[in-house]
Amino acid sequence: MSKKLKKNSPGASSASQRLTQWSDVIKPDAVPSTVRPFTEDVDWRIFRIMAEFVEGFEFLSKLKNEVTIFGSARAAVSSWPYKEARKLGKLLGKNGYTVVTGGGPGIMEAANRGAREGGGASVGLDIELPKGQRRNDYVDESMGFHYFFTRKVMLSASAQAYVFFPGGFGTMDEVLEMTLLIQTGKITDKVPVILVGKKHWQTFLDWVHENLVHKAGYVDAREAAILQLVDSAEEAFDIIQKTSERNFG
């Protein structure tokens, strides 16, 4: 069973803070403070990216039995998807799983909230936005990312299941990327991609099968089967229970 994580732990420090410390060693006589930070310079951007990857993997290395939950940041507390995500988070928390989300509102908040209510580990990997991070109040351990692509790698790196509740463009992007990684063998096919909510996802799956599988042949039927459709938190949990701990990669 996962050990409950401490809120605001050292793992939540940002990569840009560490880079600023590195700059004192690498460039002790750097330009005056009136000039923009060196981390914003194109020549140094690669180091900021590297730092996010290093700190991200360090952060994830202490987690156990991770399940990553995705979905709309706009889902209302009173909505069916929010309630079902909260229910799944609670089921996972009670059974020793670590619930990992993007750390924001909506579905992410619901899953983190449920995980805490279930006594489990509630983790948020959120994104730094111009107006500040939108970290929900139910995250017990978190890390902020500057780049969307490094954050997405961390959301996929070691989870033993991916669960998708209804969402918009961001959720669709994540569904397709995780499916592609499994399709191409970059992630083992033992990691399920679970879509929760038939009313929302069925039309999309019908389109995939009709146009991509049968008409054009762009996708094999076995590849389309990577996407597993369920209609409740309990059904999703039944699939997750059949999975096992996964290492990075």
Image (tube, helix red, strand yellow):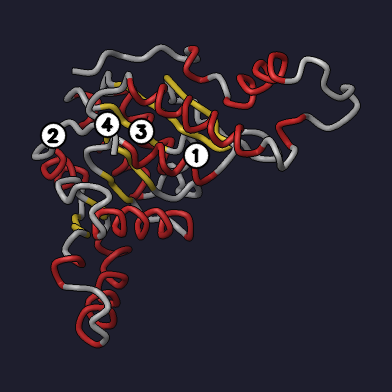
- Residue that badge 1 annotates: 105
Q: Earlier in the sequence, mark 1 or mark 2?
A: 1
Q: State the mark number for residue 100.
A: 3
> Callout 2, which amino acid?
Ser
Q: Which of marks 4 and 2 is nearer the N terminus?
A: 4
Occupied quadrant, residue 87:
top left
Disc 3 vs disc 2: which is toward the camera? 2
> Residue 125 or 158: which is nearer the viewer?
158
Q: Residue at x 26, y 70 (%)?
A: 205
* Distance (Cα) linking label 1 and label 2: 28 Å
Q: State the mark number for residue 66.
A: 4
Check contact, mark 3 vs mark 2: CB within 8 A: no
Check contact, mark 3 vs mark 4: CB within 8 A: yes
> Callout 4, which amino acid?
Glu
Q: Quadrant of the C terminus?
A: top left
* Distance (Cα) linking label 1 and label 3: 13 Å
- Residue that badge 2 annotates: 244
Q: Which of marks 3 and 2 is nearer the N terminus?
A: 3
Q: Earlier in the sequence, mark 3 or mark 4?
A: 4
Mark 4 secondary-structure assignment: strand
* Residue 85 image offset from top left, x and y in percent: 31, 41
* Residue 222 image offset from top left, x and y in percent: 13, 67
> Residue 88 or 39: which is nearer the viewer?
39
Q: Is residue 224 above or below residue 161?
A: below
Q: Which residue is drawn at 47% across and 24% down?
A: 142
Mark 3 secondary-structure assignment: strand
Check contact, mark 1 vs mark 3: CB within 8 A: no
* Distance (Cα) linking label 3 and label 2: 16 Å
Q: Which of marks 1 and 3 is nearer the N terminus?
A: 3
